[in-house]
Image: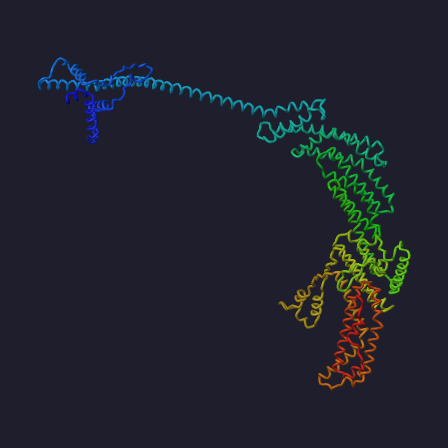
Amino acid sequence: MAEAALLLLPEAAAERDAREKLALWDRRPDTTAPLTDRQTDSVLELKAAAEDPPVPAELPIEDSCSLTSQSLPIDQTSIVPESTEDVLLKGFTSLGMEEERIETAQQFFSWFAKLQTQMDQDEEIKYRQMRDYLSGFQEQCDAILNDVNSALQHLESLQKQYLFVSNKTGTLHEACEQLLKEQSELVDLAENIQQKLSYFNELETITTKLNSPTLSVNSEGFIPMLAKLDDCITYISSHPNFKDYPVYLLKFKQCLSKALHLMKTYTVNTLQTLTNQLLKRDPSSVPNADNSFTLFYVKFRAAAPKVRTLIEQIEERSEKIPEYQQLLNDIHQCYLFQRELLLGPSIACTVTELTSQNNRDHCALIRSGCAFMVHVCQDEHQLYNEFFTKLTPKLDELLEKLCMSLYDVFRPLIIHVIHLETLSELCGILKNEVLEDHVQNNAEQLGAFAAGAKQMLEDVQERLVYRTHIYIQTDITGYKPAPGDLAYPDKLVMMEQIAQSLKDDQKKLPSEASFSDVQLEEAESDSLTKSVLGSTESLNPRPQATISPADLHGMWYPTVRRTLVCLSKLYRCIDRAVFQGLSQEALSACIQSLLGASESISKNKTQIDGQLFLIKHLLILREQIAPFHTEFTIKEISLDLKKTRDAAFKILNPMTVPRFFRLNSNNALIEFLLEGTPEIREHYLDSKKDVDRHLKSACEQFIQQQSKLFVEQLEEFMTKVSALKTMASQGGPKYTLSQQPWAQPAKVSDLVATAYKTIKAKLPVTLRSMSLYLSNKDTEFILFKPVRNNIQQVFQKFHALLKEEFSPEDIQIIACPSMEQVNLLLSVPK
């Protein structure tokens, strides 16, 4: 059975041997020694036999040489035995012993040796076939390597040839590029030279055109030629290093001069021809407004397009080229001269006619004259813009010259005006209507007229200030009051009676106007308020529903009325600094006139009338100057010679004569020069403070005088008592007041009764006078309050004195009224 197994499984045994060999090979010690060719072949054979890889039928290599490969077929069909007999039969057959019998051990060992030899041969066949198969691969690889080496040789040859050709081509390309670059440079140089020469070559063309007899400045080619000429001059002027630079520049300048002469001749001839045509129409006549506009403006505007384009070209080039600027100046001068020829006689005639028409109405003359010049200035600017696009100062110079003709005619009339109303109205017209309304809204066109109007306004203001000084001196300071001006309180009583009668009539006839509706005239009350009521403490009066007689404008003292009217005229007409000086002078003069009038009224009537007259008019002044939003303060500079006077007295002292010739700091002359220098002092005068000061003084005098009127005897009595106390305190004899002859209770009782009767009798008169003059309950209450307080204080002190110096029986004899009785007597309805 073992022999049968060995015979049946030769391939399995061989495979097992091969795997064992491989395992032994894998387990061999690791060494770095290289394998021999034989060892390598053995390894490959063993791995091929063990792994039994599939061998390709042919080598899959295709190349240009169309290498062929031989296939090495290997029969890999496995034989599966059908039966034991079949296997043995095939084994013996393969050994050629199908007829022999193994009978002895020698036969078996012989058979086994053959069998082993056969198995070894069969086993080696696979490896030989694999070796042959790999040898075929090696031959094919060797053939491929030979072909690759041949191909590499051919590629190396091609690369050498390519490098040779590439170098030749690059050299040729660089040579071509250099030639193209040189060609381009030469072309650019030629174009540059041609471009530079083009400016010089234009000289002949431009000269030919300028010398042509058919050349006209209105032709289509003139402006392009002019532009080309300017470009040539600019280019040549910027390259002074060119050859023949001075010659060509001079020739081009000559051409430019000729072209400018042609333009100037054409423009000037156009303007002069137009002017001559209009002057033939009797320019000395004074046409009406329509004819004047047609004569002086329509014709010129119709001719403006003929020269407008040419002038625009000149103006455009005038900023860069001086010759064009000079030409533009000549054209401006020619244009303005032609306009002056046309407008001068007409304006003079118009101004003369306006003067003759408004010889007595200066305000209408100023309005009409200024309106006329405003229209002239506006029309001239509009006409100028038809010809030119840029303004010139010469236009304003012409318009100022034309406006001066109006000023020259109006000034002699203005300086002879003497009325302040007329002068103030003229100032208002020039300042408000002319300068603010017209000039400010159109300052560009009316700039020249504004200069003349301002000069005229300054002359009117100067005349107004001068006449105001005279007015203050003559009509305020030098005013001589008439008897009717000082008829106080008679005129107030009379006006009050008239007002009462008008009120009674109003009740009967409601449709008629009452006296309380009387208001100030509009022309005289621009800055005056209706009510002039105030107080000594608070000068803000309470609004009244009616106007009392004392508050009527016509009832004011004339100097007050004139002062306030004068200030109202000046306030908006002159500068604030000048107004402050004039207001200071006017208010000072007015206060002095009121003080004089108050003294006269006090002498002619009563002292209370004079005091209330002064208080009332000072309140009017204080209230009426409040709306003037300005300071009534001026600065005066004076020279103080006090030190000079003292030094002069000192040097004239005989004791100082020996010190004249001392050569040290104690020299008298040196001391005089150092110490006797006059000082410059500055002090401020405030008219409002002057009014307040005089008002305060007048109120204090009134309070003092009224207090003295009511309680003078009581104050004298208490003064005597105080003197006795003082003497006793200083060591004098003791006294008993009730035993004094002048302080007996009966006499003191008479004194108290007299004071009480005086208050009761004269207090209504005082209150009536205050109501008549002041006509304001608040003012009356505030003014009377200190008087009442003084009386109450005197009675309080008197009561204290009685309790201290008199017995209760004497106090009953004296019968002094209580404080409640005094307060009730002094109570005034508020």
Furthest toward the bottom, the residue is 733
Name of the residue lying farthest toward the top: 99
Vertical placement of 128 versus 238: above or below? Answer: above
The answer to which of 463 and 776 lies nearer the viewer is 776
Residue 47 falls in image quadrant: top left
Image color mode: rainbow
Residue situated in front as seen by the camera: 88 or 276: 88
Q: Quadrant of residue 21?
A: top left
* Image coordinates for residue 250, horizontal then vertical, percent: 64, 29
**Left or right: 202 as drawn, with respect to 142:** right
Q: Is residue 510 visible from the viewing direction of this image?
A: yes
User: At which x and y percent is residue 521?
Assistant: 85, 54
Q: Position of residue 261 (x, y in %)?
A: 71, 29
Q: Which quadrant does the C terminus fall into?
A: bottom right
The reply, left or right, for residue 807 in relation to residue 246 is right
Q: Nearer the viewer, residue 415 or 778?
A: 778
- In the picture shown, does residue 373 fall above or below 72? below
Residue 738, quarter of picture? bottom right
Check the image and report above or below for 34 versus 609: above
Residue 478 visible within the image: no
The location of residue 588, given as percent across then percent down, is 79, 61
Number of marks in the rendered image: 0
> In this rendering, would 65 be left or right of 652?
left
Instruction: Say which quadrant the N terminus sits in.
Output: top left
